[in-house]
Image: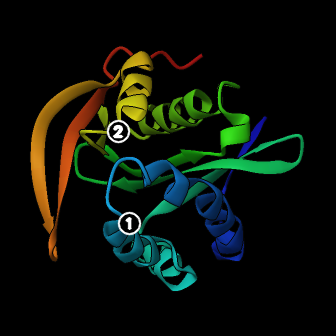
Amino acid sequence: MHIYQAQASDIAKIKSIADQVWVNHYATIISQEQIDYMYPLMYSEASLAKQMQDGHQFFIATLENQEVGFISIKKEKDCIKIPKIYVSKAAHGKGIGRMLIEHIAKLASQEGFNALELNVNRYNTNAIAFYKKVGFIIKEEVDIPLDKFVLEDYVMIYQLADYFIP
């Protein structure tokens, strides 16, 4: 497996992974109306380009020369936020998600950050179980208005104070 930092020229690859994963994954968690609203808002090529311009960094994971997952980060004052992490269904169980988190944890430690933080839908039980398995804990429960929808999330945090960089 290989992880590399995406550039603007990689936006189509990010969108392709999102196209494979996002809608199918959220179909059992949120309404189709909310999917139809949120997906283009977050994953159109223009939206991804704007996210990069606004300081979001994307990292793409490849396995056997195929793009199989990505993670996005945004550096904040005291932590690195992870707005997005997705792995294609065909690559589930191969450690890709863990390797993406470890890659960002190492980067965060090297740059002096003390935590990783992310939001996850409270009904996204598979993702919550994964995050707990790799060391995240629930920090708080939040409801975030998004036009006529409400994002019902947990904020989860991964403390880096004891993270060891080999």
| Residue 78 point in image, percent of width and height | 23, 43
Can you tell which mark lies on residue 32? 1
Query: What's under tag 2, amino acid-wise?
Result: Asn
Q: Is residue 9 above or below residue 71?
A: below
Can you tell which mark lies on residue 81? none
> What whole-number distance in Å separates the C-alpha atoms at marks 2 and 1?
16 Å
1 left or right of 158 in image:
right
| Residue 20 point in image, percent of width and height | 65, 57
71 vs 162, nearest the viewer = 71
Quarter of the image where the N terminus is located:
top right
Q: Which residue is mark 2?
A: 124
Q: Is residue 144 above or below residue 115?
A: below
- The residue drawn where x is 53% and y is 20% is 165
| Residue 50 point in image, percent of width and height | 45, 81
Q: Nearer the viewer, mark 2 or mark 1?
A: 1
44 left or right of 32 in image:
right
